[in-house]
Image (tube, rainbow, N blue to C red):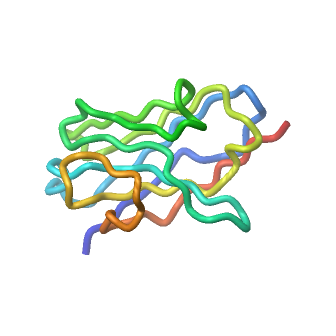
Amino acid sequence: QVQLVESGGGLVQAGDSLRLSCAASTRTFSKNARGWFRQAPGKEREFVAAISWSGASTMYADSVKDRFTISRDNAKNTVYLQMNSLKPEDTAVYYCASTRYVSGRSDPGEYDYWGQGTQVTVSS
């Protein structure tokens, strides 16, 4: 069974930064695109960012563009989400996911494996 484990969440103030990490339990994921999604209370899960298997291509939701950066280290089988200039509306549980495709996707239905999530809370 493949496992994705997120870490790095926490409570911060508006304007602060956080870096989330997502480690996979198997190196076979070096050929798979990865994504980050988030879900706030009472809302549906939404796309945040995705990165291709090589790391050469990335995509972002408009709400986080120019503030968040997704990256990956295939040698460590880990994907990162650097979040800068955090806003209270960024408060959510953040999930990483892995897709069978080599290019990033924004549709959560195209992802096969999910982590357990890490809470990010941004106070005003």
Count all numbered tags in the image, as a single digit. 0
- Nearer to the camera, 120 or 104: 104
Query: Quadrant location of the N terminus?
Result: bottom left
Looking at the image, residue 40 lies above or below residue 50: below
| Horizontal relation, residue 25 to residue 66: left or right | left
Which residue is at a point 23% across and 46% down the rendered structure image? 103
- Residue 60 x/y as whole percent: 45, 38
Query: Quadrant location of the C terminus?
Result: top right
Residue at the farthest bottom position: 1
Which residue is at a point 35% across and 34% down the rendered structure image? 71
Which residue is at a point 23% across and 30% down the rendered structure image? 56
Which residue is at a point 18% across and 37% down the rendered structure image? 54
The image quarter in which residue 119 lies: bottom right
- Nearer to the camera, 5 or 46: 46
- Nearer to the camera, 113 or 58: 58
Looking at the image, residue 120 lies above or below residue 15: below
- Residue 110 x/y as whole percent: 32, 64
- Residue 35 x/y as whole percent: 38, 50
- Nearer to the camera, 89 or 61: 61
Residue at the farthest right position: 124
| Horizontal relation, residue 44 to residue 16: left or right | left
- Residue 105 x/y as whole percent: 33, 51
